[in-house]
Image (cartoon, rainbow, N blue to C red):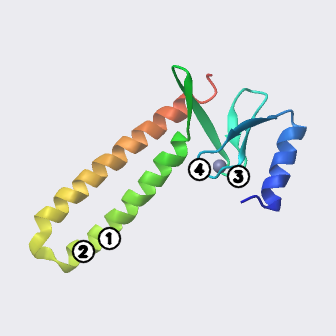
Amino acid sequence: MKNDEDIKKMATLLKSGAIMLADTCPVCGSPLFKLRSGQVICPHCDLPVVYLKEGESETIAVEPYILNKTKDILLKKLQQLTSSLDQDPENMSSYLALISEILEAIRDISALQGGAKANNGSV
Ligand SMILES: [Zn+2]
């Protein structure tokens, strides 16, 4: 869905010398823009888009979006588990096992996000 805000953003991008690409955002379907720096972004999601080249086919990944979404879901699950743990102390060990798995996954995601941040600007 394109709204006025998106159109305004797209106009600003074009004015700044960005190019509208034929590719669309894998998340929202908006047209993607290539900035003068070479970075490709989605004006709707306001996220950088990464192209993964594999042979002839080209896939687009929105890694930060996927990571944030996963982390968000995990954190919500963690919140649910914590309240279940409180209400159901007999099954504490199975809850704790799940909680520790979720925490580990969140740690992995944070590590990936940290790595992505460290690479910003160097390319
Ligand atoms: Zn998008």
Q: Amino acid at mark 4?
A: Val
Of discs 1 and 3, which sits in the foreground? 3
Q: Amino acid at mark 1?
A: Gln
Q: Is residue 68 left or right of residue 89?
A: right
Give the labeled residue for mark 4: 27
Q: Between residues 113 and 53, which one lies in front from this camera angle? A: 53
Of the numbered discs 3 and 2, the one sitting upstream in the chain is 3
Q: Are marks 1 and 4 in contact (CB under 8 Å)?
A: no
Give the labeled residue for mark 3: 44
How crowded pointer 4 is (Cα within 10 Å; few <14, some 14-19, many 20+) is rated as some
Q: Amino acid at mark 2?
A: Ser
Residue 80 - label: 1
Give the labeled residue for mark 2: 84
How crowded pointer 2 is (Cα within 10 Å; few <14, some 14-19, many 20+) is rated as some
| Label 3 beta carbon less than 8 Å to ligand 1 | yes
Badge 2 marks a residue whose secondary structure is helix
Residue 95 position within the rendered picture, expressed as x and y whole percent measured from the top left:
18, 64
How crowded pointer 1 is (Cα within 10 Å; few <14, some 14-19, many 20+) is rated as few
